[in-house]
Amino acid sequence: EASVEVEGETISVIGPGLLCLVGLGKGDGEEDAEFLARRILNGRLWANESTGKNWDLSVVEKDFELLLVSQFTLQGSFKVITLSLCPSSFSSNQASLEMLNTRALSSSQGNKPDFHTAMGPGEAREFYASFVERIQKAYEPDKVKDGLFGAMMKVNLVNDGPVTMVIDSERQRRTTNMCRRLYSMQPPTRRLKRGALRQPKLVSL
């Protein structure tokens, strides 16, 4: 079960199903949207009571609902501070080294989240709306709810299990590109018998 409140008013409610927090990043496109939509609708996250198999049925097969909520903070990360120290400079002054490390650890730069990889608000609003529409068309419109883009929302969730999955379209894109590069590699040249066909070679990492 999940719901979304905005300014004290409940705007979306679902029963059993999936709450999907959607973080849009710079460079996301149609390929990412298609991959995410397919994974959300086809991911086998429920047990099959008829067969006793776990992780066997999808949200579509269970005829459950979906609640999509845009959340740009999923693109956030904490800045990393890198210090270049010369050991010989502090060999005779351990106190100075400890003081420097203390200052680095207490620096606010390392504790403030950064969201530079998040998609810009204008582009994200349009992309998110099209993504919700894509899910609705692929499933059933009345079973797909969403929050209010850009608003301060209060998201309530009853998480059975709990079960939480992370779906990263960028990682999938990198893996796909790597596989394409591997398949495009030519196998080592070697003598073949006349009339023999060269077989493709799978390169494993």
Image (cartoon, rainbow, N blue to C red):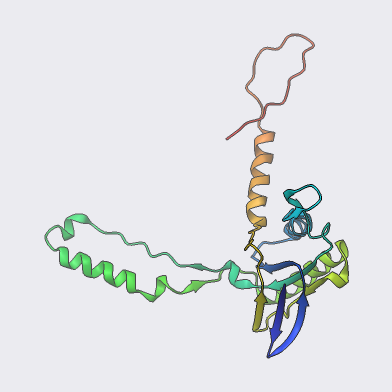
Image spot of residue 76 (x, y percent): 55, 69
As drawn, 163 above or below 121: above
Question: Position of 34 compared to 150: left or right?
Answer: right
Image spot of residue 140 (x, y percent): 88, 66
As drawn, 178 above or below 69: above
Front-lying residue, 203 or 186: 203
| Figure quadrant of residue 99 | bottom left
Image spot of residue 198 (x, y percent): 74, 20
Front-lying residue, 136 or 55: 55
Quadrant the C terminus occupies? top right
Q: Residue at x 11, y 60 (%)?
A: 92
Most extreme residue toward the top is 194
Question: Position of 69 compared to 83: left or right?
Answer: right
Quadrant the N terminus occupies? bottom right
Q: Residue at x 66, y 57 (%)?
A: 167
Q: Residue at x 39, y 76 (%)?
A: 108
Q: Residue at x 85, y 67 (%)?
A: 136
